Image (cartoon, rainbow, N blue to C red):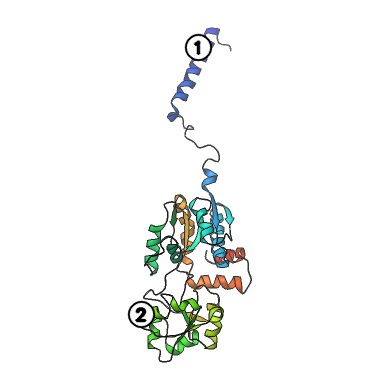
Amino acid sequence: MKFPMHKARAASVLALAGMLALAGCGSSDPLANEPSAGASGESDKSVVVGSQAYYSNEIIAEIYAQALEKAGFTVERKFNIGQRDAYMPQLENGSIDIMPEYTGNLLQYFEPKTSARASEDVYDELGKALPDSLAVLDQAQASDQDSYTVTEKFAKDNSVSSIEDLAKVSQKLTLGGPPELAERPYGPKGLSKTYGVDVAFSATGDTTVEDLNAGTVNVANVFTADPRIKTDKLVVLDDPKALFLASNVVPVVEADKSEELAAVINPISAKLSAEELVNLNVQSTVDQKSAQDIASAWLGSNG
């Protein structure tokens, strides 16, 4: 049925007026504030994971990457970048969104004269020292730092589990480590001042673990993530007086993404113990497994 011409013209005018009213009152349009396709949805779920040029760090970064993928993120990997001077600018400008780091070493990068040593003190000070564009998520119990380590037999024979227990050992103690350890604040002088433990020093260099196993030295400066801690059955001595700068594994993230990344990554840090990290490193150096396979197996076994 056709409208008379004047009624049709009136209907057209009314329709046009309605459209103009809607256009002039954008807030009343339920679609007016909707983001355009791809404006936030996909970009918010995209993340760049970085790693140092170090097999242990790459394994942790791969664990982050796979966990984020399982959580629905689109992940780009930027691995084996190099050392701090190479990747820190990329973290600060947002080219990398998340990367595994080490609390003590990173704190010294920003605050070279820091006096913090204990794990929680270092972590708290690091959070304050970071640029506003960066944040740290929960730190792991796992660390990659200097330690004083003994053989399992020495620990049992002398009832030693911490550095302060060395003061009760009757036999002469010889500390092995790189030549520079002789003058480091946690070297023989620091050991004596902090724990009252006096030692002779032997510059063992690259053969420190071999010398420890051979009995040439009975205390050695070994990093806590060294896979030989497991393969050679070594005992890392506790450091209750914080002689060493704590350097726990910690995710550094772009501050704007910290909340959404924390939901995925914090549970990983909660399960990444010192023993777990050593086991992961053994799988890389001894079993010759890829970072991808190691990460996938670890995530599967840890739920």
**Label 2 crowding class (10 Å Cα cut-off): few <14, some 14-19, many 20+?**
few
* Residue type highlighted by circle 2: Lys
Residue ranking furthest to the bottom: 171
Horizontally, residue 292 falls left or right of residue 151, namely: right
Viewer-side label of 1, 2: 2
**Label 1 crowding class (10 Å Cα cut-off): few <14, some 14-19, many 20+?**
few
Q: Secondary structure at mark 2?
A: helix
Q: Is residue 72 visible?
A: no
Q: Position of residue 55 (x, y in %)?
A: 58, 67
Asked whether 182 or 221 is in front, the reply is: 182
Q: Is residue 122 visible?
A: yes
- Residue placed under numbered mark 2 in the picture: 193
Q: Position of residue 90 (x, y in %)?
A: 52, 53
- Residue placed under numbered mark 1 in the picture: 10
Instruction: Give the alpha-carbon distance from disc 1 to disc 2, as whole Å.
Output: 97 Å
Q: Residue at x 61, y 65 (%)?
A: 293
Q: Is residue 107 above or below residue 31?
A: below
* Residue type highlighted by circle 1: Ala
Asked whether 8 or 296 is in front, the reply is: 296
Give the quadrant of residue 227: bottom right
Asked whether 236 or 40 is in front, the reply is: 236
The N terminus sits in image quarter = top right
Q: Secondary structure at mark 1?
A: helix
Horizontally, residue 236 falls left or right of residue 52, namely: left
Q: Position of residue 7 (x, y in %)?
A: 52, 10
Q: Position of residue 161 (x, y in %)?
A: 42, 82
